[in-house]
Each structure stands twice: as structure tokens, then as C-alpha cells.
Image: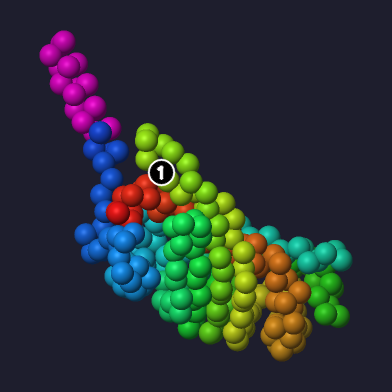
Amino acid sequence: MAYRLVISLIWFGGLCLSARVKKFPTYVDKCHQDDTDFTKCMLKAIQNVKPHLKSGIPEFRLPKMDPLILPEVGLDAGAGFIAKFENVEIYDADKFTIRKFDIDLDEDKIKFDMSFPHIRIKAHYSIFGKVLFFNLDGSGPADGNITNCRVMATVNGERYVNQDKQYLKLTDIAIEGMDFGKPNFQFYNLFKNNPELTEQTNRILNDNMEELLNDLRPNVEQTIGKTVLEFIGRVFTRFSIEELFPK
């Protein structure tokens, strides 16, 4: 009995130890801080990572990115307008193009400029309030497509020490530019039992979608910023600065 207990404890201890072992993806070459072209190395590393984002990268604790799941997104444009999107599924976000990506380890900043040729969004929506000249109070499935979306931002971080190693905590993000591209959304059951009015309203909404999204820009930027911080932040909480970027 005692022997079995000892074996069990050893097995459990080994299991816990293995769970703490951090493995770096074999398909990613690390970029050294003193690389003559650190930015070029980073861009190459991101290109190597891209094909694996679709199904997720356990080594970085990154969930699958196609679809990328957001439990809930809320939009409040004031004046009594409230929209809530639940079980949000974002498709093709892993097919981005990097225009610029720069990590400044002296300032602990990350700057990026990236575009998305196509993004599809599926969710369950609830909308209440006045939009254009419609008084809406509906809920149901939503399906949207956005082409040629672009985001430019700066992520700020601060260092902290954990077990004698320096880590980078991403604290906030500033969206410096955002182009919604060409969006098109379909909100089903906007007017229950009146598919003709629902179709007409969707057509008018899409004709004015750029204006509507600009009104909701602060909410959209906040949602995107929160998602980016959480996603990229997983990598930096998993690995120390030295482990990610050796000297």
C-alpha cells in the first residue's frame, strides 16, 4: 500500500512538472535582441506562425483563430441605442497581411499595421434603439462580411519580475487608425413575421453601414483592443523576454 502511494506521488509530481515545462514551437526561429535586422527577423517569425494560427498554438497558449470565438460583444452608441452580440464567431482572421510590425524592447512597445482581405462574422444579436429612422427591437442570427479591413495600433507594456525572470505585461493599446473597408451585414428577424421589412431595413442599413460604424467606432476600437491585448498577451505571460528574445 505504501509502495503504491509513493509511486502515485512520483507519477503525480512528474505530471505537474511536465505541465510546467515550456516548449517553444519548433517552426519558429527566435529573434535575438542584437540581431542586425531584428524587425526583418520578427516578420519572418510571424510568417512562420501564420499557418498554425488557424488551429491554435498550444505552446503559446493561443486558441484556434478560425473561427476566433468571442463570448459577447456589446455596443452602446448612446441616445438609447444598445446592441449585444453573443457567441461571436470570426472567420478568416488568421489570413491577415502584415504591413508593419515592430517591437521596441527599450520602450516596451509593439507597433503594428495589418490588413485583413476578408473577415466573416456570425453571431446572435439583440438590438434596441433608433438607427437612422428605424426604431429597432429585434434579435436573431447575424451574418456579416468585411473586405479590406485595416488596423494600425501601438501596444504599451511594462516589465515585471517572476522567479528572477523579466516578463512583459501588455497594459493598453492605442488604435491609431482603422479602415472598416467594405462591410455588409444581414440581421435576420429584425421585424418578426415581416421578412419584407427586414430585407428592406437590411438594405438601407448596409447602404449606410460606413456611417453607422463610424458612430460606433469607439466601441469597436475598444473591442478590438481588448481582443488583441488578450491574444498577444498570452505569449508574453507564457514566456519571459529573454526566452522570447535571447541576447
Q: Which residue is mark 1?
A: 166
**Direction left: furthest residue:** 3
- Crowding at mark 1 (Cα within 10 Å: few <14, some 14-19, many 20+): some
Position above or below: 233 against 197: above
| Residue at x 68% of width, y 60% of height | 74
Q: Split into 4 quadrants, where in the image is the N terminus?
A: top left
Which residue is at the front of the view, 74 or 135?
74
| Predominant SS of the magenta segment | helix
| Residue at x 44% of width, y 71% of height | 101
Q: Is residue 153 visible?
A: yes
| Residue at x 87% of width, y 66% of height | 79
Position above or below: 152 against 209: above
- Residue 170 image position (x, y, % from top left): 52, 53
Q: Is residue 51 visible?
A: no
Q: Which segment did they paint magenta?
A: 1-16
- Residue 29 image position (x, y, % from top left): 25, 63
- Residue 213 image position (x, y, % from top left): 70, 76
Position above or below: 121 against 239: below
Is residue 156 found left or right of 212 in the rendered image?
left
